Image (tube, rainbow, N blue to C red):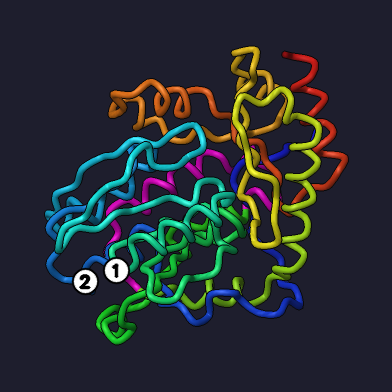
Amino acid sequence: MQAIGGYFELADYEQGKGFPHQGGILLNTGRNALEYILRCIGKVRCIYLPYYTCEVVLEPLKRLHIPYIFYHINAMFELVEDIHLKEGEYIIANNYFGIKDAYIQELADKYGEHLIVDSAQALFFMPIPGVKMFYSTRKFVGVADGGVAYGVDNKYSLLYGEDDSSLHDSHLHIRKERGAEAGFRDFQQNEVKLDNQPIRLMCQNTRDILWHVDYDKVIVRRRANFAYLHEALKDKNFLQLPDLNSSICPMVYPFIAKSGRNLRKELIDNKVFVAKYWPNVQKLASYELEYEFATKIVPLPCDQRYGEEEMRKIVDLIKDNV
């Protein structure tokens, strides 16, 4: 049985229209794109960031000795209450699962240059003029690394050398040739290698791959798969998700069964590999909702590798177990 989901295999070279972020500052990881932004800002008194976020976002804050304060979100993945920023203070807001485009635009209108958008899960959410934003490419395409920064000066990027993705790309080749299980250990090891890496420019190999992906096809397939899952599962999903509009291209379909049953094990046992976002939140959250998100959200794969047949399998597995 062919596996569905999990980490990517090496992307194929296709005749696409070009990488949508060619105009950004191309760096080696998403977290280093955030660090680059913070270094360009200079003096940062404090950063506000959500409890429900990936722990790697803390790497640049700790490295630069920037104080930070966590804030809560609600069931719609939006701020529980307004945060009033003072001079030198900034807020990081996540475009969760690539489905919060409209809300991020609202925050941009409110906070302007004091907003930093975490678009690691929203590769196709285009940059907002005057707003600082950072992206991660490997969550959407079969590359080993890659980050993009916007909203700050590009000239400082000349201070950095180029990265080498061959040091952490073995899992991409193994999955392509031998399947998901065969390369999983390499994937885990390569994830660790990305921790606390210095800022470097995006390597040539990653750029070559990103420049030869058919992104139109990626967007169409992701949107169609998300729509299929949403139509079939929205009545069983505890989460209230926005309908797709013309700008949204989702990373995954986030699902919590209304029955309260955690379907992660059943899916993985049937080779539908689902991630867990983010275990670190269980240690941080003093609020029940973020803890529930971290423990119960099952991010169902809806990416470009799959079509209706695979989506039907996912739906059938869920309906058989709730």
Q: Is residue 269 magenta?
A: no
Residue 37 is labelled as 1
Residues shaded magenta: 174-200
Q: Quadrant of the C terminus?
A: top right
Query: Circle 2 sits on which residue?
Result: 41
Residue 291 is labelled as none
Q: Is residue 175 magenta?
A: yes
- Is the Cβ of the residue at disc 1 closer than 8 Å to that at disc 2? yes
Q: Position of residue 139 (x, y in %)?
A: 55, 53
Q: Secondary structure at mark 1?
A: helix
Amino acid, disc 2: Ile
Residue at position x 16%, y 71% in the image: 42
Quote the CA–CA distance across marks 1 and 2: 6 Å
In which quarter of the view is residue 159 placed?
bottom left
In which quarter of the view is residue 309 placed?
top right
Compared with 256, 275 (above or below) is below
